[in-house]
């Protein structure tokens, strides 16, 4: 099975800061990676697919990059509503395994 | 509007059984694979099971294989998860999610609100 590892596990940043989350796959998955955002008490929300393609309605301050085994999710200018836990998921095989999550908090 | 609505969660004793349901609306249910994903208390996401649009292909995570059975009734736009021999570690919020296949990858684009399964004596 493909293992997904996210870092850091949590990050605290100020409004307007740039925040980057890293996701590493235990083997190459090309660009088949998704990102989800989950707010407390809510279901995950689909943010991005194919490593860098934004789902419709997702603000452009979110961006993704990477291929193979290392991927990043960047929030260019952190907003209060971005406080959430973010999960990566490998989409190379069905079903895809998730990373452990990164909690983003606002200072 | 695409919607998924889970039901059937509740309190069950260890070793017991429970059947979850997920009803889809706002899309052609039979055209999409769907999955169950769970989240234990304070934990991350764990994929549990998935089924193709026709129901002909089924997939299970190692932790539930042999105990859980996924099925669907496309005439009722409903997905099921029969959970037997439940353990304390199965306690979680169970989400159903629609699967989209795009560009060679498989993604979960719409999620239900979840249903809580509590396993305790």
Image: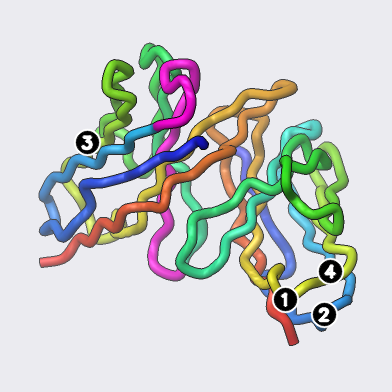
- Give SS at disc 3: strand
Residue at the location (20% across, 50% down)? B86
* Chain of the residue displaying label 2: A
Q: CA distance from mark 1 to mark 3?
A: 40 Å
* Chain of the residue displaying label 3: B
Residues B79 and A71: in front is B79
Q: Would you name the residue on which mark 3 appears? A: B82
Q: Give coordinates of residue A100: x percent, y percent.
A: 59, 59
Q: CA distance from mark 1 to mark 2?
A: 7 Å
Queried whether the magenta region covers residue A71, the answer comes back as no
Quarter containing the C terminus of chain A: bottom right
Residue at the location (55% across, 53% down)? A44
Give the numbered dot on residue A26: none
Residue at the location (57% across, 43% down)? A97
Q: Tell me the mark number nearer the camera, choosing from 1 and 3.
A: 1
Q: CA distance from mark 3 to mark 4?
A: 41 Å
- Quarter-wise, where is residue B78 in the image? top left
Q: Give coordinates of residue A92: x percent, y percent.
A: 67, 30
Give the numbered dot on residue A15: 2
| Earlier residue among tags 1 and 2 | 2
Q: CA distance from mark 4 to mark 2?
A: 10 Å
Q: Would you name the residue on which mark 1 appears? A: A80
Q: Would you name the residue on which mark 4 appears? A: A19
- Say whether marks 3 and 4 touch (CB < 8 Å): no
Q: Which residues make up the magenta segment?
A: B25-42
Label 3: how many Cα within 10 Å (few below 14, some 14–19, many 20+) = some
- Quarter-wise, where is residue B102 in the image? top right
Quarter containing the N terminus of chain A: top right
């Amino acid at each position: 099975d493909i293992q997904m590892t996210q870092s850091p596990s949590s990050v605290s940043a100020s409004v307007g800061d740039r925040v980057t989350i890293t996701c590493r796959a235990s083997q190459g998955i090309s660009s088949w990676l998704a990102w989800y955002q989950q707010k407390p008490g809510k279901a995950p929300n689909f943010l991005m697919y194919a490593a860098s393609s934004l789902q419709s309605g997702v603000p452009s301050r979110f961006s993704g990059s990477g291929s193979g085994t290392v991927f990043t999710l960047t929030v260019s200018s952190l907003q209060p509503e971005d406080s959430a836990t973010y999960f990566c998921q490998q989409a190379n095989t069905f079903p895809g395994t998730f990373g452990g999550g990164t909690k983003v908090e606002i200072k | 509007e695409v919607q998924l609505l889970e039901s059937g969660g509740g309190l069950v004793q260890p070793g017991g059984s429970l059947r979850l349901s997920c009803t889809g609306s706002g899309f052609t249910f039979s055209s999409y694979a769907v999955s169950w994903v769970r989240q234990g208390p304070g934990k991350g996401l764990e994929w549990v099971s998935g089924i193709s649009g026709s129901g002909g292909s089924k997939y299970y995570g190692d932790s539930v294989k042999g105990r859980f059975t996924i099925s669907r009734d496309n005439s009722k736009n409903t997905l099921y998860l029969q959970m037997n021999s439940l353990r304390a570690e199965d306690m979680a919020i169970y989400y159903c999610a629609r699967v989209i296949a795009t560009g060679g990858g498989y993604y979960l684009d719409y999620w239900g609100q979840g249903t809580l399964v509590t396993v305790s004596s």
